[in-house]
Image: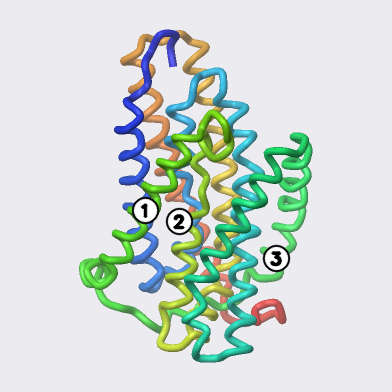
Amino acid sequence: MPEGTRPLDRAALLMLRVGVGTALFALVLTTVQSSESRVAGMMMAFPALNGISLLMAPPTDKTAMARAMLPVIALNGWIAMAFIAVFGLLVDLVGSTATSWVWPLAAVAFAVWLAIIGAMAKLPARAGGLLLAAFLFSVPLLIAAWWRCPATDSFNYGDIATIIDSRIWRIGLFAATLFLLLSIAEMFGDAHGVLGRLGAFPLLPLYSLATVALSGAAPADGLIKLTGARPAILVGILLAMGFALIYSRFLMILHRRGMASSGWWAAAILGLATGWMATGGAILVLAEAMNFADGTLTLTGCN
């Protein structure tokens, strides 16, 4: 952003984040309850809010901000894997009543995320680097183990309009929760930089994971979709990390070229849209590759 350029009004930016996040949740909701569960898995980590945060950050912060995002994105991945593992334990322990634990489990997962983020803010920067390194080391191993875990596509709740209409209350609740959390982050942004600047709350993946868990006729149906989507979720997180690094570098190149304000915004928004389309295309291609790999091999880790 050229020197002297004023960012969009904070209230408008807040509403933009809420609108984009809610639209993305509605898209995940439709793919979760259709035949594209692996697309939904990767969409859980789609870099929508992170992309907007990078676009709106001061120019000197963009590269550093992207680097700071990576451990947070990794943490979101661990939280998602932990959610699936704990829900699996609940299905084994309490059977059909496991669904009553889904939303409390999501709330606990978010509380744990907040606690870890708070602890990381007080630790040296290398703590986040160690978390990121551990995540990147383990992800290829986990994807290799889970790649051919079958993702059942046996239940379909109808067309997009029917799905949205039947879940409109959940979409509204998501929008209200996102608005509240981003408003709090905006209020305390200066004191809590990670919460205020990154906009990396795991709200989209946690709401989506809860939706998947409740998407079948029985808890076991939702668990099958969750376990089958694990490699897709991990791949989506890697895509989100790559997007953050590439887009932040693109924005810094624009800044160094000293473009006029209107030209900067046009190029930056075009770059954001292009990055989102490239990410979406990669999701479709990789989901098809996963579907192609299904069929003959079911590893122990799929259970």
Cα–Cα gap, marks 3 and 1: 28 Å
Please state the horizontal and vertical placement of residue 183, each as a whole percent of the image.
Answer: 40, 41
Q: Is disc 3 placed on a helix, strand or loop? A: helix
Q: Residue 159 versus residue 9: which sits nearer the camera?
A: 9
Q: Residue 138 versus residue 222: which sits nearer the camera?
A: 222
Give, as a three-letter code, the residue at label 3: Ala
Instruction: Kindly identify the residue that appears in the image at 60 percent across and 82 percent down.
Output: 90
Give, as a three-letter code, the residue at label 2: Leu
Q: How many marks?
A: 3
First in sequence: mark 3 or mark 1?
A: 1
Crowd rating for badge 2 (residues with CA inside 10 Å; few <14, some 14–19, many 20+): many
Is residue 247 toward the left or the right of residue 92 in the image? left
Q: Indicate whether 234 appears above or below 224.
A: above
Instruction: Residue under label 1, please give it.
Output: 24
Cα–Cα gap, marks 1 and 2: 8 Å
Is residue 69 toward the left or the right of residue 119 in the image? left
First in sequence: mark 1 or mark 2?
A: 1
Crowd rating for badge 1 (residues with CA inside 10 Å; few <14, some 14–19, many 20+): some
Cα–Cα gap, marks 3 and 2: 25 Å
- Residue 144's disc is 3
Please state the horizontal and vertical placement of residue 212, each as a whole percent of the image.
Answer: 45, 72
- Asked if the residues shown at circle 3 and circle 2 are in contact, with their CB atoms under 8 angstroms apart, the answer is no
